[in-house]
Amino acid sequence: MQLYNTLSAKERAKLIDEAGKQRLTLSFYAYAKILDPKKFRDELFLAWNALDALGRIYVAHEGINAQMSIPADELENFRKTLDAYDFMKGIRLNVAVEQDDHSFLKLTIKVRHKIVADGLNDETFDVTNKGIHLKAQEFNNLLEDPNTIVVDFRNHYESEVGHFEGAITPDVETFRESLPIINEQLQDFKEDKNLLMYCTGGIRCEKASAYFKHQGFKNVYQLEGGIIEYTRQIKEENIESKFIGKNFVFDHRLGERITDDIVSQCHQCGKPCDNHTNCANDACHLLFIQCEDCKTSMENCCSTECLDIYHLPLEEQVKLRKGKEVGNKVFRKGKSEALKFKSSGELPNQPLAKAETKNIRQKIAIKKVLIGKAEHYYTKSKIAQFLIENNELSLGDKVLISGPTTGEQEFTISKIFVKGIYCDTAKEGDQVTFEIPFRIRLSDKLYKILG
């Protein structure tokens, strides 16, 4: 039995591009008593691997929490794999607002102690004794009630780029931190206030609402399906959005725009901005907000110290990291003395700026092949630098540059330079530069359009 991935992320991305199929990014969760999570995990891997389903999934004795990418034409078969289990029959799938074929590039199913780490003794309360679920319009109506307290049960780096108007936004890095803080803060309102809560997809609120009912709160409500489902409903039913800004998501996109309001700032210069990035220094990987100007000047780094390290030869970078914890063990989510404009806790309800409203992420239905990745963008000369990793690039080729911020931009190659020398064709391994009519980002990919 194959219970592991056989392809690298790069190889998977290439296959996805060559297949040319639309994929759906979605999420779901379910609390249930699972007697043998390891057996459950293995069954899911076999079923989903056969459908080319990818994603990050956690299973535990208390249930399942999944964020996934599946081929759109396999949606019905995917549902059948869920319906095979009584507790997942007819389960709601939260489909992403913005689709990206590369949102997940591996199928990872991990057995955990809990699907949501809460720091609590599971025996202290019944997680199924949850609060009242509210649809988008019902949630908006209760928000207008002066007797309502609304709480954001996400972390500081999530709420900073988008939140509901008037929400309490705890300055926390983990869900487990928020429970005792909010409980203490609202002790005087157990009997006479409506406690209204929300999170990304509903899973944290499902547990939080049960916890607060156990703590004696009488009127506990939660947003059904979280911000993802709220967004779907307001768009379909033409309901006013009380959520402002972006919804942070945990795949490589790092955010879905809900309204064109920008409520946060570049952590480095203070310019209105709500685009997260990870520091390019492999010994840091700090998650922070960075505008395009700072991204270009700082080359995706959070500080001058990290920029200096990033410019060192790879061998020297590895030596500096020797004996130190790196990667996921030091991954920090948006707090550093180097970030002068970081905001946490009390957040503004008024936008600092408006984002462009054009749909730059609209997918272009074309046949294409991945040939390279972005390495640099020279702002003054408007020249892009790419590394050709596959196939070749020639004069007259129609290409597509794609990325989570750039969207999908199509144009024709009129000049190519390899190491500064004009040429007709660039081959695999060549570092190429050419003029480009728009700004690119380091996360962008270069595709050749076929046919």
Image: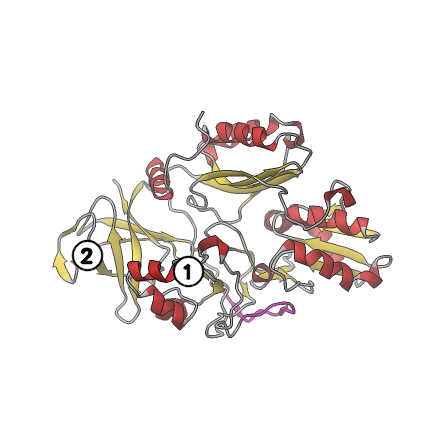
> Could you give the CA–CA distance between mark 2 and mark 1, rounded to whole angstroms?
39 Å
Rendering quarter of residue 141:
bottom right
Rendering quarter of residue 66:
top right
Which span is picked out in magenta?
Answer: 342-356
| Image coords of residue 348 (percent x, y) | 62, 70
User: The residue under label 1 is which amino acid type?
Assistant: Ala
In the figure, is residue 22 to the left or right of 422? right
Q: Give the residue drawn at x 35%, y 71%.
A: 297
Q: Where 47 falls versus 192 (above or below)?
A: above
- Color encoding of the figure: secondary structure
Task: List the single residue furthest toward the front.
Answer: 323
| Image coords of residue 365 (percent x, y) | 37, 42
Are there few (<14), some (14-19), or many (20+) residues within 10 Å of tag 2? some
Residue 128 in view of the camera: yes
Q: Where 323 falls versus 97 (above or below)?
A: below
Image quarter of the C terminus? top left
Q: Where 84 falls versus 5 (above or below)?
A: above
| Image coords of residue 300 (percent x, y) | 39, 64
Are there few (<14), some (14-19), or many (20+) residues within 10 Å of tag 1? many
Image quarter of the N terminus? top left
Say if the magenta span includes residue 348: yes
User: The residue under label 2 is which amino acid type?
Assistant: Ser
Dominant SS in magenta: loop
What residue does disc 2 label? 414
Q: Nearer the viewer, residue 98 or 141?
A: 98
- The secondary element bearing badge 2 is classed as loop
Earlier-in-chain disc, 2 versus 1: 1
In the figure, is residue 299 to the left or right of 108? left
What residue does disc 1 label? 283
Numbered tag placed on residue 269 in the rendering = none
Q: Nearer the viewer, residue 189 or 308?
A: 308
Say if the magenta span includes residue 147: no
